[in-house]
Image (cartoon, rainbow, N blue to C red):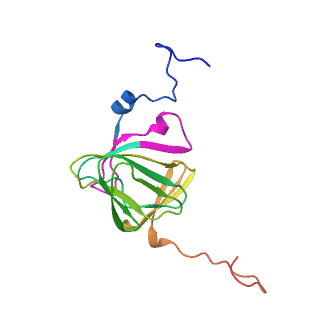
Amino acid sequence: MGEAKPGDPKPATLLRADEIATDSDSYHHPWNPSSEIQGCPLSRRAGLERIGVSLARVPPGKESFAYHSHHCEEEWIYILRGRGVAIVDGVRHEVGPGDFLGFPTPSVAHHMINPHEEPLEYLMGGENREIEIADFPDLNRRMLRRGPKIEIYPLDAGEPFRRSSPAGSDGDT
């Protein structure tokens, strides 16, 4: 097995710390005016498609996305620096460096806020499935994503599906 030498080309799968620091995006969730996340989608930039990992920074006084839950994609958060408040299933929890949050599916609703004076920095990640359903209970919205197509519905618009029973059947199937 060889060793890389100075001047050798860097593989596309390797993101250097200086690239990550200078290749930062900013995101604001359209349904939350207090939302602001700065950071880098690490996995996407390294060519990964089935999992997502991002470095995220929430500035003082800002929030991550919007309070939401997932039906299909598991998600996790690992706090690197700063302090924040994780709202998980309606309960506020102070979080800080080394704390880990995991959201198996179907997940409880969750959200990160930074009420403190220093930035909150964390790694977040999860699955990138072809289909995802996310609920936004405070906004009464459900998002359905199929590939690149996203549809939004009122959360309370669903109705139970009832099949008519053939003669002699014992009901729904």
User: Residue 106 colored magenta?
Assistant: no
**Looking at this view, is 134 or 80 the one in front?**
80
Q: What is the number of callouts on the image? A: 0
Residue 19 located left or right of residue 59? right
**Residue drawn at point x = 30 percent, y = 52 percent:** 35
Q: Which residues are magenta?
A: 26-54
Q: Quadrant of residue 81?
A: top left
Q: Position of residue 53 (x, y in %)?
A: 47, 43
Quarter of the image with the C terminus in it: bottom right
Position of 154 relative to 147 (above/below)? below
Q: Where residue 13 sits in the image (x, y, percent)?
A: 52, 30
- Residue furthest to the right in view is 168
The answer to if 52 sits in the magenta stretch is yes
Relative to 8, residue 33 above or below: below
Expressed as whole percent of the image width and height from the top left, the position of residue 7 reads 47, 13
Residue projecting furthest to the left? 117
| Quadrant in which the N terminus is drawn | top right
- Residue sitting nearer the eye, 95 or 74: 95
> Compared to 79, does 172 lie above or below?
below
Please state the horizontal and vertical placement of residue 129, each as a whole percent of the image. 56, 50
Q: Residue furthest front?
A: 98
Query: Of all residues shown, which one is farthest toward the bottom?
Result: 168
Q: Is residue 8 above or below residue 128?
A: above
On the image, which quarter does residue 131 sit in? bottom right
161 left or right of 137? right
